[in-house]
Amino acid sequence: MDIFNEIGPLKAFLRLKKIGFNSIGFVPTMGALHQGHISLIEASRTENSITVCSIFVNPAQFNNPADLAKYPRTLESDIVLLEKANCDILFCPETSQMYSSQSQVIFDFGKLDKMMEGHYRPGHFSGVALVVSKLLHIVSPDRAYFGQKDYQQFKIIEKLVTDLKFDVSLQCMPIKREPDGLAMSSR
Ligand code: PAF
């Protein structure tokens, strides 16, 4: 697996890979990977010639600094899981790469980001939309994979991609569950 921490070298590498009609599948994550994430990698591998995973704990989507501080960071074991799943490329940037300047961009999805989880976490979905926009620009994938567990997030990303005319096909994949039925989660 090729691992990149910086945007420029990743983009240059992907530009070369795209020559020859290779299709790119993309699985954005915040790490602490589990079987749910790996099922997204597997789906991408069956539908694309190259699979890119990103691991980035995105500060913009945490409205509580304590949650950001205690979010699990398990890069070494994540890399082991990704190699086992035959992921081709990992992008794991530092915050300074993704937010080199303080972003003033705010997204408003009307009712969609004010209800359910959005009601309890103001600004969360704007932060998700911001980082997903950046990642889609950087990776420029043919297909991007998300879990059905975060269905509200998926609908918001769907709206983002439609409104901003990103040239990517979004795939919403089935929930992976623990033996007791609970949806697998990083937290
Ligand atoms: O679902 C997640 O893990 C995150 O919200 C995402 C889509 C990777 C954006 O940071």
Image (tube, grey):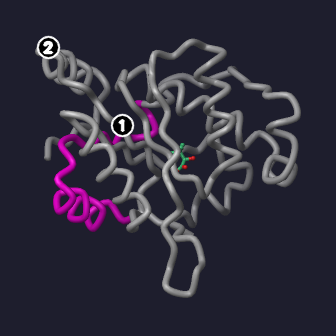
Q: Residue at x 11, y 15 (%)?
A: 20
| Structural distance between the alpha carbons of marks 1 and 2 | 17 Å
Q: Residue 10 location, x and y as percent?
A: 24, 27
At 48% from the left edge and 67% from the top edge, which residue is drawn? 176
Q: Which mark is residue 129?
A: none
Task: Read off the residue under disc 1.
Answer: 26
157 left or right of 113 in image: left
Range covered by the magenta-colored residues: 74-97
Q: Please give the name of the residue rendered at 81% of the width and 36% of the height, measured from the top-left corner.
A: 112
Q: Answer yes or no: do the residues labelled 1 and 2 have beta carbons within 8 Å?
A: no
Task: List x then y, in percent, for residue 59.
Answer: 59, 44
Location of residue 141 by image quarter: top left
Question: Is 81 drawn above or below residue 105 in the view shown?
Answer: below
Q: Assess whether residue 106 is covered by the magenta stretch.
A: no
On residue 19, the disc is 2
Q: Residue at coordinates 65% horizontally, 44% vertically from top-left?
A: 153
The answer to whether the residue bearing label 1 lies less than 8 angstroms from the nearest atom of ligand 1 is no
Give the structural element (helix, strand or loop) at label 1.
strand
Dot 1 or dot 2: first in sequence order is 2
Amino acid type, residue under disc 1 in the picture: Phe
Q: Quadrant of residue 89?
A: top left
Q: Name which residue type carries label 2.
A: Ile
List x then y, in percent, for residue 42: 29, 53
Element type where label 2 sits in the image: loop
